[in-house]
Every structure is written in C-alpha cells, then in structure tokens.
Image (cartoon, rainbow, N blue to C red):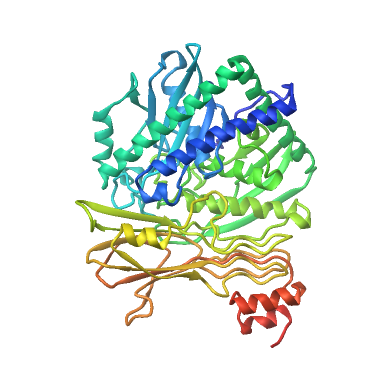
Amino acid sequence: MSKEIVLNTTISRNQGVTDPIAMEVFSNRLLTITEEMGNTLIRSSFSTNIKERKDCSVGLFDKRGRLVAQASHIPLHLGSLRGSVQAILKRFPVETIRPGTAFISNDPYLAGGTHMPDISVVTPMFANGELRFFTANIAHHSDVGGSVPGSISANARTVFEEGIRLPPILLVEDGKVREDLLDLIAQNTREPEERILDIRVQVATNNQGNAALDSLIRQMSIDAVEQAVEDILSYTARRLQMRIDALGDARGTFTCYLDDDGSGGDPVPVTTTVWVENGNLVVDFAGTGPQAKGALNVSASALEATVFYSVKALLDPQLMPNEGLMQSVDIRAEKGMIVNARFPAATGARSITCQKIARAIFGAFRGILPAERLMASGNDDLPTVVFSAAHAKREGTYVYLETLGGGGPATGRTDGMNAVHVHVTNTSNLPIEALENEYPLRVDEYALVERSGGAGKYRGGLGLVRQVTSLQDGTIFSARSDGHKHPATGAAGGSDGKVARLYLNYGEEGQKSLPSKVTHLTLNYGDNIRIETGGAGGLGHPTERPDESVRNDLVNGFIGPEDLPLYGRTL
C-alpha cells in the first residue's frame, strides 16, 4: 500500500511583522468579531444542543481559504470549518462567487467535513466590489436523518447510513435563502422545523460577521486589514517555529487503545511518534490500526484539526489558532488507517477516535517536555447519549443528544478538574432544568463518580454520573462511548483513572450492564439509563501528596478510606 501523507498549507517564513502592537490590537478585534458571532449563534438558535450546550463554532477566512481567526469554542470544528471553505473554493472558483451568496455543506469526503451532523454555512465577504474574506460557522444539529435518531450509530458501516450528505451547495442567492433546498434538507431529518430555524440562524450569524468586517475595513482600509492579516499569520508561524526548534532531537512515542472498532472485536491501537525533522514537527501515526468497520473512522480534516489543537496546547497554548499554526507541522498517516479513512467509511463517531489521537500525542510528548509540563491522560472518550421519542409538547419527535464530561488530567502543577470536557471538545453539560423542561425525561442523579480519579501527587479529576428515566413508552436510546476497557493512564508514578460504565435500570431488579456502544435500545416508561464517565489519571507518586490535600479529598468524597494506603496514610 502506498503511503499517502496529509500535508499542511505552507506560509512564507520571510514575512515580517510591521507593527507588533498594532498587530496585537488587530488580532483582538478579529477575535471580538468571532466571539460576537458565536454569541449570536448560541443565543438565537432553537435546539438545546446549540443554545444550551454550545455545540458550535465560528471562524474567519481570507479569500484564499486560509484560517485567520477562530472563536474559542470547539477545536475539532476547525477541521470542518477549514475543510468546508477549501471545498467551496475548489468547487466554486473565486471569479464565479458573487455578493449576496452563502454556501452550505457537511460531507466528510465531498466537503471537508468531519461527520454529517456538523453543518457548515460559509458566506463570502466583499469589499470595494472584490471578494476579500469568508465568514463561516458550524453547528452540530441533533439529527440529520440516517438509520438512528441523532444520526450517529457507532456500528454504522458507511456514510450512507449517517444522514443527508451535503457537498458544497449554494444556499443563499441574491440575498435570499433557497427555500426549496432548505426544505429538502430539513425534510430529510427527524425535526424539520428545528433544522430550518437553526440553519437560518447560521445564515444570519455570518451576515452579522460580514457587517462587522465591513465596519473594520471602512475604518482601517482594505490594504491595512490585509497587511495586518499577513502579520498575524507570519507571527504565529514564526512563534511556533521557535517552539519546535527548542525541542532539539528529542523523540517520543505513545500507544493507546479504543475498546473496539464500533462493531465489537478487538481493541484498536492508536500510535503516535513525534520528532523534529528539517525544522518541522513530524507527527507520525505508523502502527495505528486499520480503518474500522464501525463509525469510529476519522477524515483527513478531523485528523488535521486534532493534531493542530494538540500541538498548540502542548507547545504554546496562547498561540492564536490560524493558518500560521499549520506551517511547520508534518502529519504522516497512511490512507486506510482509522485516523485517515477511505470513502465510504462511516465517520459519525469520529470524535471518540480524535480524543484518542489527542491522548496519543499528549502521551508521546511525555518523553519530550520537562517534568513540570507533563500531563496524565484524561477522560479522552467523549461519551454521548441520545434519547428520542414522540414529543410531549408538539407534533413529531424529539432528539435529545448530549456529550458528557469526565475527569480532567492531572498535570505537573495541579489536580485534574472534575466532570469537564477535555481536548477537542468544549461543549457544556446540559442543565437538568433545561433537559426536564424540554423532554419527557427525568434526571434521577447528576453527580461526581466518587473515587474515580487516579491517585497521585496530583490527583486525576473525577468522572460524572448522569441517570435518566424515560417518562413514556417507546423511547429509543443509543450511546457511543469508549474507555470501558482501557482507563485513562497515570504519569510519573500516578495511578490510572476508573473506567467508564453504562447501565440499564440501575438499582432495579434486572439491572444490566451495557457495552460502550448501544444502538436503538427501546425504553418503556420508568426504565432508566445510568452513565458513569471515566476518571482521569494521576501524576506523580501518591505518597508525595500533601497531608492536607489527602484529608480534603477524603472529606469531599473524592477518595475513600480504602484508598489511604495508596497515599501511604492510615486513618
């Protein structure tokens, strides 16, 4: 099999920053535009997955499709945003794009997406009659059709089971939404009204961003804006290059495992080796398992987004996420691996594998970074639950989707955070009040999983438990998760975290333990689902943990009396 390399866009290293103070002010103005766009998208949307959980992102791109700025939302969405803009430019040459247009897409193979529920809307921005920028946003829609409610089944075999596929298509023409196209998209989902409303909000969000860019250009002039963009990209590229050069000839390798490939079977390895070669940081996935039978496959754009996030987080967290970040990173992944899948492999549950990619990269850097910057593994699984049934308040069905947080990793300076999203996701846990108000479901318990964090000088964060009871017959439940077999690993003598668990009718007669992947399980009134997400690994030997910290952990229920011997203490 020939080795196909995923390559990044290059930027000239000879570009200089003309005015660093002005550049810093300008970069914050761009971030303000993206943050305001993001706030509008969240506040104005109708689905709980966007308005409550904030499962969305926005970005600005130049006319060449280079990422200029991204709001601080979800790192994985960088792949879909960047991929969609590049796919649009490939299908619609710059000279054919007109004012008053906008494009829509989602497909991981035709449109640079990562999975079908993430729908991108991209709007060109014109100044002085010429295309200058693109505003773009992406939102995770709770359903886009397919074989199961929520559109994502971990055991799906192809993308044809995962909902409506959208290549780059003209959604807005002459300033008006194409109603026939919007209706076609919406009617291929389980909640057409919600899809129509949320897509309209996406269109309006980009229009707001274009207006803000127009105001900026009128104030500064287009030449000054474009020069400032070049300054930002150049600065980001050169600053990252300095971080890479400082690594010297160090080399690190790490392997972690998925519980299975989405359809059962053996664990799938994700192996990453990192080193510096000819001034570039090489991130090589040789040794990683083959393309999965199930939906855990990762598209090229999702792989790139995960790698770029990891490099930024590890080498320079304050670095702006833009195209300059991508200059000196060489991603090597053979086509046909689970991390670089071939069409028509299913990709719906790609986030689980992307979390493992991040775990492997962070693990590989343990052999490179100084001790104070080490990090244990966290809840790198992104457990997701979906409930669907007849809507209690209106006609049609509802689809309640939620990704859940877990234990945050211990670092060389701090304990891990409890019940948080880590790595490439950054959504919020849905408040109980919103869940129970919106859906015929009852939350029986929402708490931390005691004793789930790994012991260490710095303790791993705790996972969370969410137990939900169905309040009507015929509720369809699905789950996609991982980490039921392979825990988050500790580092530098720290202990592993507790694995995740999923139960049907917990605490009742006939309680049943479920696997990490469940598809189309029918619940009746009174049936409950309990999910316990994984805890994170600890860092450093537990006997080095201060006495006061151990006492506080015991009082707070983070550890139990039976854990004290691990810390070299007794009651």
Q: How many marks?
A: 0
Image location (x, y in percent) of residue 557: 58, 77
Looking at the image, which is closer to me, 486 or 170? 170
Residue at position x 43%, y 61% in the image: 265
184 above or below 544? above
Quarter residue 116 falls in: top left
- Image check: 336 left or right of 69? left
Residue at position x 65%, y 25% in the image: 11
Looking at the image, which is closer to me, 48 or 255? 48
Q: Residue furthest left?
A: 395
Quarter residue 332 falls in: top right
Quick one: quadrant of the C terminus?
bottom right
Residue at position x 45%, y 29% in the image: 208
Image location (x, y in percent) of residue 76: 52, 44
Q: Is residue 485 visible?
A: no
8 above or below 445? above
311 above or below 547? above
Looking at the image, which is closer to me, 494 or 453? 453
Q: Is residue 329 visible?
A: yes
Residue at position x 27%, y 30% in the image: 181
Image location (x, y in percent) of residue 106: 39, 37
Image location (x, y in percent) of residue 472: 23, 66
